[in-house]
Image (cartoon, rainbow, N blue to C red):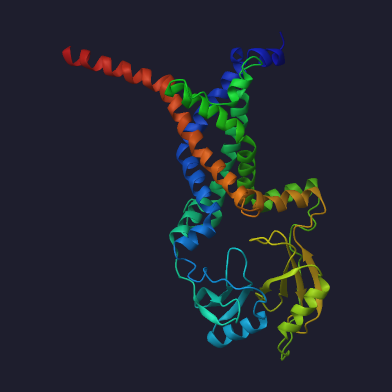
Amino acid sequence: MGFLQRYYRRPQQLGARRLNFQVHLWAGIILTLYLVVIGITGSILVFRPELEQLSGLKPWQGIRVKEPLADIATVVENLRAAYPRYRIVSVDVPTENDATFVAVLQGRGRIKVACGPADGKVLGEFPRGRNWLDVVQELHETLLVQQRGRGRMLNGIGAAFLLLLNATGMVIWWPGIRNWKRALKVDFRRNWRRINFDLHVAVGFWTILIASFWALSGIYFGWPRQVFNLVNSISPVITARPPAISVTPESNAPELDLHALVGRAYAIDPGTTLGGISFPYGRRAPLGILMRRRKSPGYEYVDTVYFNPYSGEFISTWQYGVNQSLGDWIIWSQIPLHFGTYWGLGVKVVWCAAGLAIPVLAVTGLLMYWNRALRRRWKTLRKARPAAVAA
């Protein structure tokens, strides 16, 4: 009987499977704490907008107003009058996650300011400093390592080991052709040890695809440039990265009419709705008018219409998410599929449950190791102790 036939019928007899088991076992034990932390924090962040509202971190979220919204040019004028010493970085129009205009301003530090959706008046600043959700996000993204790049790299290493766990776990999962259906479900009529085993096996199978994608995207977030270059060498990345635009600085240039620029953006990019304005971050940077192709809390379906901030001349349009190659799809999909916050409450619930499955797998795996090995050793030690005392 050949190797594949033996694996198909009686995989437990293969030495390669036993080696897979040892790799899976010790990688899982070493990563237990990491998996628990990354799974729980990720599940919390899926519902960050809702938790921000419940925690009072968005004081004006209860505002409800029907269209038409205030003119964004009026919002900018109000911000400049209220914060003359600050530079406006961006202004976003209200979305399903933010009931107000949200402006980011740079001065002595960076602040976020809310403006009324109907009249554009400044309502106030969002709470400054880190809140508990910021800490959860930093723990999930950088493991609270102060150097952000190093923290993401450590997270990328953990993601690579998670991918190894998934690969070895899938090899171990196959019980043979006679019993494979049993490995898809949990028999709650059995004792707790058997239920724990079934949970580990069944949950691992049903979450293998999304957990593997999270591992791959975690590697991408840890080494974005290297992964980007690898993908680009396989299939050219065309629209999934912003265009390199540089403008020539001009002195004594007149102030632009933002209202007119927004009107031109509507004409250039028909069928869209205004998403916000991104102001130049430097003297050679363009001004971007954000135009949404569909209702979405993120920027995965947003066009950016670029203008020269000195002359108001149209430069180009970047249609993010209008993917033209396999490379575009791979790079673009990392954020929306990793976070799962772009397609409604149902997807959020599924992503949250799948995130909690990771610590479930870690804990049930530890309990399996206890049941199979450590429990026997513990019993042996307990029996040997009275004998040693008597001797």
Q: Please tell me whether residue 114 is drawn above or below residue 4 in the rendered image.
A: below
What's the residue at 39%, 22% (across, down)? Answer: 374
Please tell me in which quadrant of the rendered image residue 99 appears. Answer: bottom right
Q: Residue at x 72, y 73 (%)?
A: 288
342 vs 167: above or below: below
Q: Residue furthest front?
A: 66
Q: Quadrant of the C terminus?
A: top left
Horizontally, residue 159 falls left or right of residue 264, namely left
Q: Does residue 193 appear left or right of residue 277 in this picture?
A: left
Residue 252 percent across, percent down from the top left = 71, 91
Which residue in the rendered view is the most extreme toward the left?
A: 390
Nearer-the-camera pick, 383 or 66: 66
Q: Is residue 68 visible?
A: yes
Across and down, in percent, residue 389 comes to: 18, 16
Q: Quadrant of the N terminus?
A: top right
Q: Is residue 156 visible?
A: no
Q: Position of residue 187 (x, y in %)?
A: 51, 23
Which residue is drawn at the image coordinates 60% and 52% (left, top)? 345
